Image (cartoon, rainbow, N blue to C red):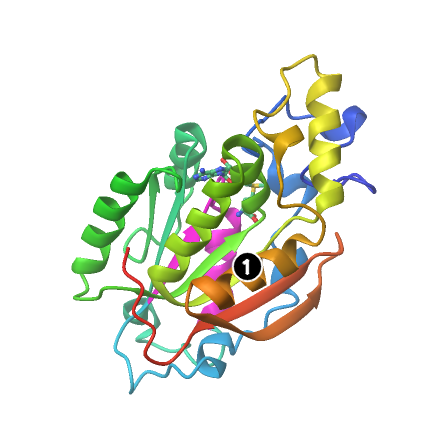
Amino acid sequence: MAAPNADDCHVDNETNEPGAAPYGNFINYYTFNPPENRLNLIPNTLLQDMGYNTEGSDIILVLDVGCNSGDLSVALYNHLQGQHFSGGTAERELHLLGFDLDEDLILRAEQSNPFPNNINFIPLDITQDVKCRTQLESYLARFGRSRFHLCVCLAVTMWVHLNHGDAALLEVLFRLASICDHLLLEAQPWKCYRSAARRLRKLGRNDFDHFRTLQIRGDMAEHAREHLEKRCGMELVRSFGNTTWDRRLLLFRRREGSQGEL
Ligand SMILES: C[S@@+](CC[C@H](N)C(=O)[O-])C[C@H]1O[C@@H](n2cnc3c(N)ncnc32)[C@H](O)[C@@H]1O
């Protein structure tokens, strides 16, 4: 049951306290933020709206960054099948790779994966440049691709930012932009950073390494948009309104001729 005022930086202590989870690696994330909270905002014709159809592209590849225990990945997979990808060939068309730095969460995701032929989960840290390059490129190579059609990065940026700092946040956004044609981003707002830091202190843990020295602060979605548009060859094409936690889902597209590489 969702705690009324909980979000992924300020979890209700009485009902949903999942421990410190300093990377947002909550063990019970989907009990207080079920996949529908976000998926309800995303049309199930998204892939079609993005210009993909079964004739133009045989296989659609989706990357889910920071997939936690995989609940949203699986729900997203089903959601994206939508009307366009429904039918007998659906299982062949869409492939999703979810990754997370928490190996226990990935194990759970693997154990409850209902579509092992089409959905894969691997442990991976998006801040690790070389490992990311190797693992993601080798997955893409299986399909003869150099980029994912869609990369989904929901409620992850704050954890990268708090744990690794400004430069890492910008690098990660660049990395994501360079491995996909479309990027769906949910950046946590600044108020969430403060709650996450407060929560950690309340639990008697050390502060996040970078919280006090971050220069990038304020309107986080706007900072991400600016960086993606000015430095990463992406352009904002749609905003899917606000989630129940008052966050926007922003859809970016690679600009024509943009060349970023992983
Ligand atoms: C708040 S949860 C969001 C889960 C999922 N993206 C969603 O929106 O439903 C954040 C997830 O990001 C993962 N994460 C944080 N930093 C990461 C990193 N550097 N690389 C990969 N995963 C990371 C955490 O382990 C956690 O599972």
The answer to which of 63 and 179 lies nearer the viewer is 179
Give the residue displayed 45% in from the left and 33% down from the top.
Answer: 105
Q: Residue furthest bottom?
A: 55
Specify whether 65 is left or right of 258. right
How packed is label 1: few (under 14 Cα within 10 Å), some, or many (20 or more)?
many
Give the residue displayed 22% in from the left and 53% down from the top.
Answer: 137
Q: Secondary structure at mark 1?
A: strand
State the image coordinates of residue 210 (x, y, percent, origin top left).
58, 29
Answer whether residue 145 is visible to the viewer in this image: yes
Q: Is residue 67 magenta?
A: yes
Specify whether 72 is left or right of 107. right
State the image coordinates of residue 31 (x, y, percent, origin top left).
66, 40
Figure quadrant of the N terminus: top right
State the image coordinates of residue 236 (x, y, percent, origin top left).
55, 73
Q: Which residue is identified by label 1?
A: 185
The answer to which of 243 and 182 lies nearer the viewer is 182
Residue 28 falls in image quadrant: top right
Total labels drawn: 1
The answer to which of 112 and 199 lies nearer the viewer is 199
State the image coordinates of residue 35 (x, y, percent, origin top left).
60, 53
Q: Residue furthest right?
A: 4
Instruction: Write down the region rendered in magenta.
Output: 61-81
